[in-house]
Every structure is written in C-alpha cells, then in structure tokens.
Image (tube, rainbow, N blue to C red):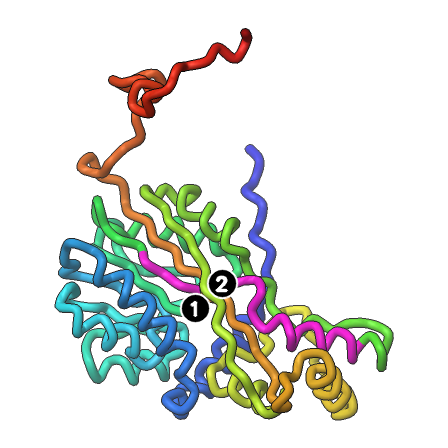
Amino acid sequence: MSETPAIPRLFDSVAQRRNRSRAAAGFGGYDFLKREAARRLGERLELMRRDFPLCLDFGCHDGLLTDEFAGSGKIGTAIQADPAPEFAAHAAAAGPAVAVDYDRLPFAAGSFDAVFSCLLLHWVDDLPGVMAQIRRLLKPDGLCLVSLLGGTTLSELRASLLEAEQELVGGANPRAAPMADVRDAGGLLGRAGLALPVADSDRLTITYPDMFRLMADLRGMGEQNALLGRSRAPSRRQLFLRAAEIYHDRFAAPDGRIPASFEIITLTGWAPHESQQAPLRPGSAAHRLADTLGTTEQDPHE
C-alpha cells in the first residue's frame, strides 16, 4: 500500500506562534486591516436569510470578527479559536475561546452551523486539508465564510526587497510567503466538498510615509516573515535602506507616500443539503432557448 505523500512545510510553526503572540498585547493599534476585512465579511453575512446558532471563529485574534457579527443578530454562540494563546485569552473575556494549531481543528464533526475565518488561512501549510476540516465541522447546510490574503498582497514590498537583495548580495532570501490567487482558492471550496462555491477578491491600498513604517505595521499585526527557509542571520541594514530607496523610486506618489497593496480573497460555500438548488441535468430543459429569444435556431452543420 502506497503512503500518502507528506504535505510540504512552508512555515516555521514556532516563529508563526511567536510573531502572533508578540502582536497580541498591542494588536488594537494595528487592527485596521483585520477590521476592514471583518467589515466586508459582515456585509456578506447580512445577505444570508437565516441565523447561525453555533459558530466557530477560527483565527479570532482579539475577538474583533465576532464583535462585528454580533450586531447582525444572525449568530448565537461563537466559539473563538486562535493559534496564539494570548489572543485566545483576550477573546475569552467575551465568550468561550480556545488555543488551537494552525492546521488542526479539534472539534467533533457536524458541530457548527457556520465556520468563519478572517485573515488567518494564508498562514497554513495545508490549505486544502484545512478547508476539508472546515467542511467536516459543518452541519448540513452549514456556512463556510472566510477571508485570506491573496497573491498580489505586498507586491511592491516584495519587488523592492528582491531587487535590493539581488543588487547587493546577488541572490534572494525567502522573505514573503506564497499566497493563493483567487481562482486556486475558489477551487478549494469544491475540492473540500462544499456546495454553491463563490470566490472573489478585493484590493485594498494603504499609503505610508516610508517602507519602515509599513514593516512596523506588519510586525504589529504579527504578519512578519515566518518562512521555514528564511535566513536566520540578521539582515544587513544596508539591504533595507536600499530596498526603501527602490520602493520610493518605483512606487511613490507625487506627495512622496508609498502604496502597500493587500488583496483580500473571500470564499463562501455551504455544506451540502438536499434543500439546496442543484443544476439541471443536460437535456432536461422544458423550453427551447430559440423560442424564448424569438429567433430561429440554426443548424451549425448547414
């Protein structure tokens, strides 16, 4: 019997949890991206014509998403879960919360009416596996509503660091995590067995006075480099100074501020249920399209 191939590891789990834990105490000063992503998920939830009595918020940070959803009146009890114990402890002030791994959800199958996640899943090694776990946790007709950072995120910073490193040291150190594009992310919904899949992306641009202020915000969010293959040696100050120059020269606006792009991918899917709308079988139409359009059907072989 052949063994299932191991999932390649991209991230250093110790560094991931350390970065996130260090961000917990001051996260309220750096939560603007999470707050905006949560607001957009809240708009999607408002469109749902039903309530969700028991929900899971995976990657809860300090409880911001659950707070955003509470005003909708559509969710009942929310179990909040985060890889950083410090965030889970903070969220516990508002309700049940637990610390979990990035890629393992220790809950019984069919437990939740909805599973939410806001800006966490771009940090998991096995995204298809985690999406399958979310599907397993949902009750029939349960909702999966998640957002994650997409592949064009921080494209300006990535390009500037890469150019500076190639110029100064003749190579490139892994500094930016690979992220899914919207088409690949959308395909994960069907692969996980979720019905009625919808995937879309929005681009959010934030401007900064310089690259160092952007990097400070990333540290405050817990979003700094945690790649397994990153160099452990301290980077030379000259590298970052040169990258900041390149960033400004290539991307700065006339007022001197630099843009930082964030792509937010939103995925929506449902655990299958017999009540859901299903596509018709080929050849089962009751009316001809030509009759509906008032045209004459043409034989393509004539």
Considering depth in this image, is 297 or 177 the residue closer to the camera?
297
Q: CA distance from mark 1 to mark 2?
A: 8 Å
Considering the image in quadrants, where does the C terminus appear? top right
Q: Is residue 119 magenta?
A: no
One can see residue 43 in this view:
yes
Corner quadrant of residue 297: top left
Residue sitting at the far top: 302
**Secondary structure beneath label 2:** loop
Which three-letter amino acid code belongs to the residue tagged 1? Leu
Residue drawn at 35 percent across, 78 percent down: 35
Task: Residue 295: give x, y in percent of width and height.
Answer: 37, 19
Q: Are marks 1 and 2 in contact (CB under 8 Å)?
A: yes
Q: Which mark is residue 50?
A: none
One can see residue 123 in this view:
no
Say which residue label 2 marks: 124
Q: Is residue 148 magenta?
A: yes
Considering depth in this image, is 239 or 245 the residue closer to the camera?
245
Residue drawn at 62 percent across, 70 percent down: 155
Considering depth in this image, is 79 or 164 the residue closer to the camera?
164
Numbered range of the magenta stretch: 145-165
Considering depth in this image, is 289 or 142 the residue closer to the camera?
289
Which three-letter amino acid code belongs to the residue tagged 2? Val
Mark 1 or 2, which is nearer the eye?
Answer: 1
In the image, residue 30 above or below residue 148? below
